[in-house]
Image: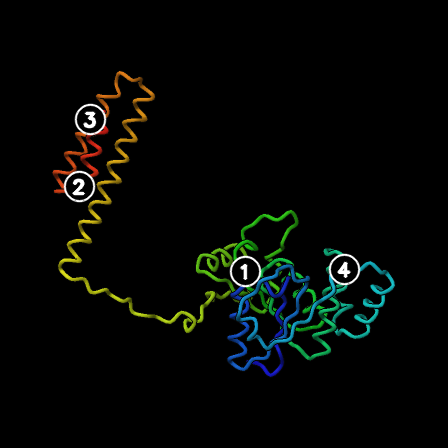
Amino acid sequence: MTDAPIAYILKRYPRFSETFVVNEILAHEAAGQAIEIYALGPVQETHFQEAIARVRAPVRRIRHQYHDTELYWQLLTKAHATLPAFDANAALAENHSAATIGQAAVLALKIHERGIRHLHAHFGTQAATIARLAARFAAVTYSITAHAKDIYHEYSEPVNLARKIANAAFTITVSDYNLAHLREQYPAEAPVYRIYNGLDLEQFPYHAPEVPTITHHADKALRIDIRQQVVEEFLLAVLAIGTHNAVLSGRNTHNNRCLFAVSLIVFFMEATGWNGVRAQEAEQMGRA
């Protein structure tokens, strides 16, 4: 735990499919760690988890479009004058779009102003890209959580996960398989850890199942009812097969196939000791 807040860098927040992010932030806050959330894109959903209401961290949204060249130049000028390592890392702009560099510069200025010394990004794609650049510009550390698609999916543009892992203070992933894969494919001095996506078990209290009390007569009736249902379903299935085959083979074979079906039913009834009324009706149907 640190005195300064940790900045969580997310592509969008909140997202209904990312309960694990909410749970993680709540766990940090329960431990006394201050969190600030920085969202790189607008909200696109209308339904959210109940747990979001318990998150105390402020949410700050980073502008993701820059159409005014004058405002963009002002941003770069401010970053040059304010950020301690912006000039030294200006060459990073060659590998990224103007919008990406703009978002990273805005984020770096915000965390520099607020005294934030560490960034954490979920997913090794856009959020990790912005976190890495902003951390380099502001001379702070960052870490990432790699999940699944960001590790294995082949995107149209390279994710450069190796570079992000190498420059991070540490990397987290969510399974032992991912852990072995990342350590093998992207060996780096920075450590890689596995932390499962946890659940708050208090939200799922255990209740012993209620075992109903069944009397002797009720138990016997229940077993008879279940046996009757099984036989009836078997009866209907066999008759359906016989009728279907008769349609395919012609009327001359219909009686033989239905008699064969009824023989199977009678055998099944004798084996189970069931002599329901519907079986008698089925036998009459087969002889019709």
Q: Which residue is mark 1?
A: 17
Label 4 is placed on what type of residue? Answer: Gln
Which residue carries the number 3 mark?
A: 260
Query: Is 197 situated above or below 117?
Result: above
Task: Tell me the mark number nearer the camera, choosing from 1 and 2.
Answer: 2
Q: Earlier in the sequence, mark 4 or mark 2?
A: 4
Q: CA distance from mark 4 to mark 2?
A: 75 Å
Residue holding disc 2: 276
Mark closest to the chain's N terminus, 4 or 1:
1
Q: Residue at x 63, y 55 (%)?
A: 160
Label 2 crowding class (10 Å Cα cut-off): few <14, some 14-19, many 20+?
few
Q: Secondary structure at mark 3?
A: helix
Secondary structure beneath label 1: loop
| Amino acid at circle 2 | Gly
Sequence-earlier tag: 4 or 3: 4
Q: Secondary structure at mark 2?
A: loop
Task: Give the total number of marks visible in the rendering.
Answer: 4
Which is in the foreground here, disc 3 or disc 1?
3
Residue at 14% from the left image edge and 34% from the top image edge: 267
Comparing marks 4 and 2, which lies closer to the viewer? 2
Residue pictured at 75% horizontal, 59% vertical: 99
Left or right? Give the position of 225 relative to 102: left
Q: Is residue 237 above or below residue 6?
A: above
Reading the image, the residue beneath label 4 is 65
Of label 2 and label 3, which has the lower sequence position? 3
Given contact means CB atoms under 8 Å apart, are the residues at marks 3 and 1 in contact?
no
Nearest to viewer (mark 4 / mark 1): 1
User: Which secondary structure, mark 4?
Assistant: loop
Residue nearest the viewer, comparing 67 with 173: 67
